[in-house]
């Protein structure tokens, strides 16, 4: 345990003093402050007639040009995870630092565990700080304090963000263990991210339209088309993450994303006007959260096993 803490503190120091941390922090803060500015410009109109969950609108309302904060964070978390993990192991090998480090009284598993924990801690600090900053600005601007339920929703939102970031860091660290060159590992991680972000929705749409054509389709056919497309998209952790945070932060109507049958139900209006409680929202997102956790564990476990079996030669 002592050796893990040694590596953990060393990696935290390296992260906080690195240029990539400063650049990522500036980008995330710029995106977050831009989104909260747009939210504050539109929150009064969007919240007209609502007496609940007004504070959550800071994170969910988008403008005509800029997207909402949850859209920004969905884009930046994979980038942060990939950047913190793509050179975690192979850069140490190529520089010879890894062999020198292992010559000290430090266990091999402490190296990868300490690096992974340090990366997740840094990611958590970045995400938590921008969420708290947005909450503080919103509290001062709109003058409406968050309810206890809204605070808990934001807390669980942060937990899901950290777990999602752990998946991407575990994936990029896996490529860092397997591949010798840092350029190859980051390109592999980015290629998977772009495939899930850009190409998988195109494939899902094409398959669903081929199986259930929308031309002259009935309402039931449209629902079947949507269900097929969503099931294919749920191969991607990005879709699972998006569904989870939308259901948590949009209690009124956000759960319809997970219940496509409601689009043709006669009580659609009642569902829209009856927001889910926190417990109901957690029940809705539990399968998505478990899937993201499982994927993060699988990626890190593979990285751990492969790293423990690798031969580390002195250079």
Image: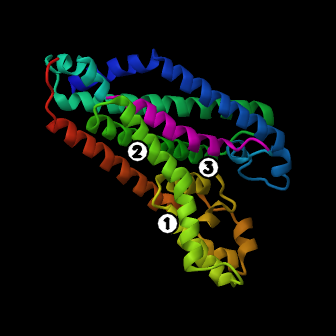
Q: Give the secondary structure at mark 3.
A: helix
The residue to which callout 3 is attached is: 149
Crowd band around label 1 with a 10 angstrom C-alpha radius: few (<14), some (14–19), many (20+): some
Figure label count: 3
Label 3–label 2 contact, CB within 8 A: no
Label 1, label 2: how far apart the Cα atoms are: 19 Å
Residue that carries the numbered disc 1 in the rendered image:
232
Name which residue lies at 63% across and 82% down. 221
Location of residue 252 in the rendering, given as x and y in whole percent from the top left corner: 69, 60
Callout 2: SS? helix
Q: Position of residue 148 (x, y in %)?
A: 62, 45
Quadrant housing the N terminus: top left
Tell me which numbered mark, 1 or 3, is placed earlier along the sequence.
3
In the rendered structure, which disc, 3 or 2, sits on the residue that comes first in sequence? 3
- Provide the residue designation for mark 2: 167
Residue at the spot 54% in from the left edge and 34% down from the top edge: 127
* Front residue of this view, candidates 291 and 83: 83
Where in the figure is residue 260, as x and y percent of width and height? 61, 72
Labelled pair 1, 2 in contact (Cβ < 8 Å): no
| Residue depth check, mark 1 versus mark 2: number of the one nearer the observer | 1
Say if residue 38 shows up in the picture: yes
User: Which span is picked out in magenta?
Assistant: 65-88
The image's mark for residue 102 is none
Separation (CA) of disc 1 from disc 3: 32 Å
- Of residues 35 and 309, the one nearer the viewer is 309
Which quadrant holds the C terminus? Answer: top left
x, y percent for residue 126:
53, 29
Note whether residue 165 is visible: no
Magenta region, mostly helix, strand or loop? helix
| Label 1 SS | helix
Query: Magenta span has 74?
Result: yes
Mark toward the viewer: 1 or 3: 1
């Amino acid at each position: 345990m002592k050796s893990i803490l040694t590596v953990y503190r060393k990696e935290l120091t390296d992260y906080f003093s690195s240029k990539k941390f400063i650049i990522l922090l500036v980008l995330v803060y710029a995106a977050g402050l831009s989104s909260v500015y747009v939210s504050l410009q539109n929150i009064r109109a969007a919240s007209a007639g609502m007496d609940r969950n007004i504070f959550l609108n800071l994170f969910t309302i988008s403008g005509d040009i800029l997207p909402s904060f949850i859209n920004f964070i969905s884009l930046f978390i994979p980038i942060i995870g990939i950047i913190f993990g793509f050179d975690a192991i192979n850069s140490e090998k190529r520089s010879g630092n890894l062999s020198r480090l292992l010559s000290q009284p430090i266990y091999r598993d402490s190296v990868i565990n300490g690096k992974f924990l340090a990366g997740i801690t840094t990611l958590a600090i970045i995400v938590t700080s921008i969420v708290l900053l947005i909450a503080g600005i919103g509290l001062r601007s709109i003058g409406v304090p968050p309810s206890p339920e809204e605070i808990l929703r934001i807390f669980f939102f942060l937990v899901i963000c950290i777990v999602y970031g752990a998946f991407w860091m575990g994936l990029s660290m896996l490529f860092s263990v397997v591949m010798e060159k840092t350029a190859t590992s980051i390109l592999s991680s980015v290629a998977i991210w772009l495939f899930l972000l850009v190409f998988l929705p195109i494939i899902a749409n094409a398959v669903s339209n081929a199986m259930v054509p929308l031309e002259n389709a009935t309402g039931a056919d449209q629902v079947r088309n949507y269900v097929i497309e969503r099931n294919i998209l749920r191969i991607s952790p990005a879709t699972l993450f998006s569904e989870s945070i939308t259901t948590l932060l949009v209690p009124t109507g956000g759960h319809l994303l997970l219940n496509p049958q409601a689009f043709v139900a006669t009580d659609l209006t009642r569902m829209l006007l009856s927001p889910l409680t926190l417990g109901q929202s957690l029940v809705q997102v539990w399968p998505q959260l478990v899937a993201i956790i499982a994927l993060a564990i699988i990626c890190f476990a593979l990285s751990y096993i492969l790293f423990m079996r690798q031969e580390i030669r002195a250079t």
